[in-house]
Image (spheres, grey):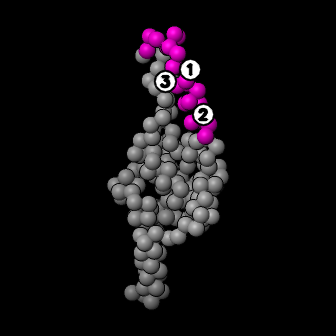
């Protein structure tokens, strides 16, 4: 199974949103913290929004948040939302493309591997993945610290009327 760059970025975006479930998160923040180019973040999240995985909020304090609970979103759901099904081999996707499918000894292996990968990605949910980062002693990255500091500074300026 090939995972496209968009799907990889999408998984990283949803993982971050899974750790920030109580607030709307800006694309700039996701870009900075998850090391994803800004130009990709908004496009990817809009696609995930159309698939009902995230919710978009417009306006000055707009951004994105998960529409579902993190334990209800699988890695497979995000990957397929961004790249569609991804079979192990072309013959698995379309037997008409290969005239050896019925006699090929490796064909059943591709089919079985594809099923195993899909099942594993279906079992992996973002609540578990987000929790692993926390349990493993995950600390704020320097980029995330800067984002948090700048958010705090904005709140202070806003409270002071600056």
Report x, y in % for residue 14.
Answer: 52, 54
Query: Which numbered disc flags the more N-terminal residue, 2 or 3?
Result: 3
Q: Most extreme residue toward the bottom, as rendered? A: 160
Residue 30 vs residue 124, the one in the foreground: 124
At mark 1, the secondary structure is helix
Q: Earlier in the sequence, mark 3 or mark 1?
A: 3
**Quadrant that contains the C terminus:** bottom left
How far is the residue under mark 3 from the one under mark 1? 12 Å
**Nearest the eye: 45 or 73:** 73
Q: Which residues are magenta?
A: 98-120
**Is residue 123 placed above or below 57 in the rendered structure?**
above
Left or right of 131, for residue 142: left
Nearer the observer: mark 3 or 1; the answer is 1
Q: Residue at x 61, y 59 (%)?
A: 132
Let me know if residue 123 appears in the view. Answer: yes
Is label 3 in a helix, a strand or a loop? helix
118 versus 44 height, above or below: above
Q: Which residue is mark 1?
A: 108
Q: Which residue: 57% across, 36% down? A: 117
Q: Main secondary structure of the magenta part?
A: helix
For residue 93, the mark is 3
Q: Is residue 146 magenta?
A: no
Residue 112 horizontal/vertical position (percent)? 58, 26
Label 2: which residue? 116
């Amino acid at each position: 199974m090939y995972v496209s760059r968009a799907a990889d970025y999408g998984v990283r975006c949803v993982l971050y949103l899974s750790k920030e479930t109580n607030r709307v998160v800006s694309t700039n923040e996701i870009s900075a913290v998850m090391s994803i180019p800004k130009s990709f973040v908004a496009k990817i999240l809009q696609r995930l929004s159309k698939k009902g995985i995230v919710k978009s909020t417009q306006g000055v304090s707009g951004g994105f948040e998960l529409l579902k609970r993190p334990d209800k979103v699988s890695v497979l759901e995000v990957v397929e939302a961004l790249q569609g099904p991804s079979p192990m081999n072309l013959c698995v996707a379309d037997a008409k493309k290969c005239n050896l499918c019925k006699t090929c000894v490796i064909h059943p292996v591709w089919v079985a591997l594809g099923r195993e990968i899909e099942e594993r990605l279906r079992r992996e949910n973002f609540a578990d993945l987000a929790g692993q980062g926390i349990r493993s002693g995950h600390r704020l990255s320097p980029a995330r610290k800067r984002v948090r500091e700048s958010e705090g500074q904005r709140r202070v300026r806003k409270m002071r009327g600056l």
